[in-house]
Amino acid sequence: MTTFLVLGALVAVATALGLIWKSGQGKLRASATHSVIPAEFLTPGTTTLLQFTTEMCGPCAALKPQLQKIALYRSDITHREVDAVDHIDLASKLNIRSTPTTLIVSDTGEIRGRINGVAPARVFLDAVDGTPTATQENTQ
Amino acid sequence: MNAHSPSGIDPRGPRFGAAITATLLLITVGAGLETAGTPAADLATRVSEFPFVLLTVLSALFLWGFIGGITRHPYGAIFKKIVRPRLSAPEFLESAAGPTFAQGVGFVVTAVGVVLHISGVPFGLVGAAGAAFIAAFLNSVFAYCLGCEIYLVFAKRGITFGLDRRFGGTPAEVSDPQI
């Protein structure tokens, strides 16, 4: 009986941890950093979806074509992919702790929000357009 | 990409393997609980116990996956031959580096449990198996790769364990996954 209770508790803890992690994925959050993104990562006149990725990141590969498609259909949006390991200083300054993390950056380099993980295209579009349907939370 | 993974892997492969691993680790914990607090006094008895043997086998499989690469892991072969033909094509492929490194993390955690049990440390085996179970469960159920996150931490410090040379490159979006 005790064995089953312990095993049940172990599964419950693992499930709770997974749900906590999942609840933080795919949501637009306000950026706590006041860093300005360098111009080399921006395209003048457009909002940039700055996707931080790494070579070993599986979900990054899933998100990339989705963001590319958004940029293809919206001339005011640009998608840029940045390897977090290759740009370690920038990633550390922006507190990139997991990938994919996508920053919504204005054409002046101001960070308007960040989205951890994979999310539907609507979330990114809402983030760019500033519509209230996106879940906005404070971060860090 | 190199010969191990010319076009990336099906991300469902490692999750399938993690599900098997999580189940076996849960069995290990369940079987080891009864004597976890009071390990047998003599070494011969301790190393012949079922939970110890099972955790040792799992640890060896983790080591196999880390050294040989996730594409050569036995669970990957099962997935490729039996499971994947019954599934639709994956939406994307991922690099083998992260899951391969995760195998290394799994090896370290389970090896600690093996060593602690050999040393007669109470709850050492079930503690390590429980920790490894949580990681495997998160991977299989939630697609959360703890090892991949740990890899990022090391990679940020320039430590890649040679995995960037073995599996470096961006996975192509093609439909010829290795597992």
Image (spheres, helix red, strand yellow):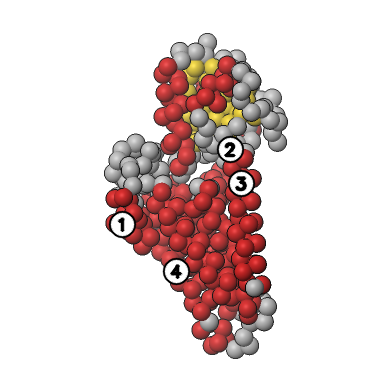
User: Which mark is in front, 1 or 2?
Assistant: 1
Q: Are marks 2 and 4 in contact (CB under 8 Å)?
A: no
User: Which mark is in front, 2 or 4?
Assistant: 2
Chain letter belonging to callout 3: A
Q: Secondary structure at mark 1?
A: helix
The residue singled out by tag 3 in the image is A19
Q: Secondary structure at mark 2?
A: loop
Mark 1 to mark 4: distance in Å? Answer: 23 Å
Q: Which mark is residue B66?
A: none
Mark 2 to mark 4: distance in Å? Answer: 33 Å
User: Which mark is in front, 3 or 2?
Assistant: 3
How many neighbours does mark 3 have within 10 angstroms: few (below 14), some (14-19), or many (20 or more)? some
The residue singled out by tag 1 in the image is B82
Chain letter belonging to callout 2: A
Residue A63 makes an appearance in the image: yes
Mark 3 to mark 1: distance in Å? Answer: 30 Å
